[in-house]
Amino acid sequence: MKKLLIGLYAGITILLMIWGYYQAIYVAPNDAMQGEIFRIIYYHVPSAAVAFVFFAISLAGSIGFLAYRQNAPNKAQIADAWALAGAEVGVVFCTVVLITGPLWGRRAWGIWWTWDARLTTTLVLWLIYVSYLLLRRFAAGPQMQTLAAVLGIFGALDVPIVYMSNRWWRTQHPAPVFGGGQGSGMDPSMLPAFFWNMGAWFAWGMFILILRFVLERQHQRIAAAEAQAALEA
Amino acid sequence: MDQAAILDHQFRVAAYVVTWAIQLSYLAWLGYRWRVQKGKKQRS
């Protein structure tokens, strides 16, 4: 039954991805000013949105770990697995954002990169979570999870700064498409492609997030069993 | 198709290909980790 549900979810996700691609390439019109290069938005913006949500999951997991680590070790381990999964999958999506953005910028602005507020804060966000993953990979000892949780909480503080950056500082990055006040928004003919891709990338993101969470829980169980075996030896 | 439109097309294709390359590479890495962990679990 479990395998059937996983297969069903994976199937729906693949169909959503195909439908999203079809909408982005064959249904949505070219942008009047930017032409075809505008279609990068259908992958770039959903990837950023998914990264933000997953960093929020990592934040919740980090807070949960710190809250439970003294009184409920099992709950703390579950929270820690969510924190790690959220951070790692968030970094994957943030990497997509940082590569697709410059590809668009090279054609739209004529440059690959500029130290604009949105770009710089996004790069800082990526660096914080990469350092979080490196800490988890290379630090040892009982304090590692606690240190990672604290870093995860500080890293998440950058998410609202990234989100607000092109509202607070009007530099190179385009103004917000949604919720950006008067003159913002997307042509109605482009909205279906945008929202289908948003749904598709969220479905895909949830799939790999849950996979990563399960993998981490397995790793925790194996590590606990090995520690127990070493104590008994 | 003029030169600008061709370049736009190439850059758009590059962005989509890179996105999928990253996502599928990560999925493959998860699959590899899964196999390694399964082996460890069976041994322990």
Image (cartoon, coloured by chain):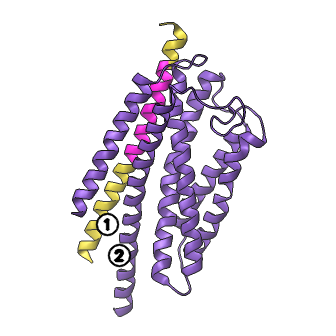
Above or below, A58 relative to A75: above
- In what element is the residue under mark 1? helix
Cβ atoms under marks 1 and 2 closer than 8 Å? yes
Q: Position of residue B27 (x, y in %)?
A: 36, 50
Chain B colour in the picture = yellow
The residue that mark 2 highlights is A222
In the picture, measured across the screen, residue A70 lies left or right of residue A26, that is right
Residue A134 seen in this snapshot: no
- Chain at tag 1: B
The residue that mark 1 highlights is B37
Give, as a single range, the part of the protein colored magenta: B9-25
* Chain identifier matching the purple colour in the rendered picture: A
The residue depicted at 54 percent of the width and 68 percent of the height is A61
Residue type of the residue flagged with mark 2 = Ile
* B9 or A206, nearer to the observer: A206
Above or below, A147 relative to B15: below
* A126 or B44, nearer to the observer: A126
